[in-house]
Image: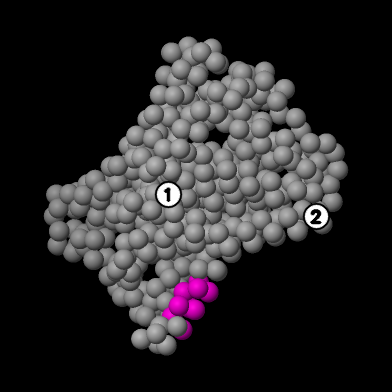
Amino acid sequence: MELLVISLFCFALLLCVLLNFSILYALVGGLCIFLLYGVQKGFTWRQMIRMSFAGVKTAKNVLLTFFLIGILTALWRAAGTIPTIVCYASSLFQPSLFLLMSFLLNCVVSVLTGTAFGTAATMGVICATMAVTMGIPLVLVGGTVLSGVYFGDRCSPVSTSALLVAELTDTNIFENIRKMLKTALLPFLASCFVYLLIGFFTPHGGAVMDLVPLFGREFQLHWIALLPAVLILGLSVFRVSVKLSMSLSILTAIPICLLLQRISIRNCVVFAIFGYRAQDTEVAAMLNGGGIISMLRVAAIVCLSSAYSGIFQQTGLLDGIRCKILALGKRFTPYAAMLCTSALTGLVACNQTLTILLTHQLCREDESDPQTLAIQLENTAVVVAPLIPWSIAGAVPLASVGAPTVSILLAVFLYLLPIYRLFLSFLEKRRQPQTS
């Protein structure tokens, strides 16, 4: 029975992918399937609904943060924060260093904004535009962008995935970030070396694109516009609450919008709700986005996925699979079991959020320490999901920059991190008998 239920859900997900339908249809269908399963197991409809809401309730803090992120990213655009960062950063581009700088700049912007999709749609698009002017293949740029946007998506204090992992594991996000940076240091440096090496052997031509005149048509590019980003980074260093940090950054961006960029209060409110919309068409193609509306889809995915979590926990639907994963963890290592699980759930889930939730649901009993569990989720589910060709986690950023799907093969950081951690997990297991 359990296998049939899971198979039906997998079929619904794959059908949506093949027909290019929104993944939300499959998630709603999956909720109906799981509710019917619970009723067949002897639970009442009222009990099943309560299970669903109990799961959603666990994500309430994440949902509130999502809406703050929507407002923040819109007002950072309107205040000129992101354009100013991009203009300062673009001066660093040199043809032979282009791939390395593309990776690093997407890392920086994704850490600042906490969104892989938003970074790909801004800095990623800019990098792709520059690559075209310099004759650098987009397939290479797609790999650097995908690596860079998920570097920040993994370890930004305003990242939805990092916040979700912290909420699921009941851990402190700033402590998680500290450990994430530590565990990713060598893969990050190795990725930089690989992109530097490829860049030196990549033929190129043309001139570096000057973005100051372009963004100057829409914004006053002044260092004051950097304050909202500087503030949130500074507060993060002192481990101030994420919601408070974002709220203060939003409050800092508003007077900059009003006084520096000459935007009316009414337009600030409109941008905060519906996202920033530039008047200049070329700027709009690179910068439009953000707003509460932009977060509704991911919020719906989290709500539905969290509802699954409540149902799975109470009905025992995944108990059989969980036992096999526990056995796999004992035979090899808990990290190896989680990496395999995240790859399988990523193949089915087709999005990062559900991959994280399902991996946590299946593997949480294999690791007793919440902090270790959080870092393992960040080093598996968060970075594996974008490597699935049909998952929106990788497809959307690549589509944003116009890169082919094969660019996934060049997302070096997303491969090196889990492989490096897998190697260390086996190394630690070999050492255990010697130290016991």
Q: How many marks?
A: 2
Q: Position of residue 313 (x, y in %)?
A: 24, 61
For label 2, count other residues whose C-alpha is less than 10 Å away and answer few (under 14), some (14-19) or many (20+): some
Instruction: Name which residue type carries label 2.
Output: Phe
Asked whether 24 falls inside the magenta stretch, the response is no
**Direction front: furthest residue:** 238
Question: Would residue 354 be seen by someone viewing this image from the given angle?
Answer: no
Q: Position of residue 228 (x, y in %)?
A: 48, 29
Res 201 quadrant in image: bottom right
Q: Residue at x 79, y 49 (%)?
A: 96
Q: Is residue 421 or residue 349 the one in the foreground?
A: 421
What separation in Å lies between label 2 and label 1 (alpha carbons)? 34 Å
Q: Residue at x 76, y 57 (%)?
A: 198
Q: Which residues are magenta?
A: 422-430
Instruction: Name which residue type carries label 1.
Output: Ser
Tell me the residue that label 2 is attached to: 200
Q: Position of residue 192 (x, y in %)?
A: 66, 56
Q: Is residue 398 above or below residue 197?
A: above
Res 356 quadrant in image: bottom left
Q: In this rendering, would 234 be left or right of 203? A: left
For label 1, count other residues whose C-alpha is less than 10 Å away and answer few (under 14), some (14-19) or many (20+): many
Question: Would residue 409 be seen by someone viewing this image from the given angle?
Answer: yes
Q: Nearer the viewer, mark 2 or mark 1?
A: 2
The answer to which of marks 2 and 1 sits earlier in the sequence is 1
Q: In this rendering, would 315 be left or right of 424? A: left
Tell me the residue that label 1 is attached to: 161
Label 1's element? helix
Q: Residue at x 51, y 39 (%)?
A: 112
Q: Is residue 331 above or below residue 122?
A: below
Q: Position of residue 344 (x, y in %)?
A: 46, 66
Q: In this rendering, would 275 be left or right of 202? A: left
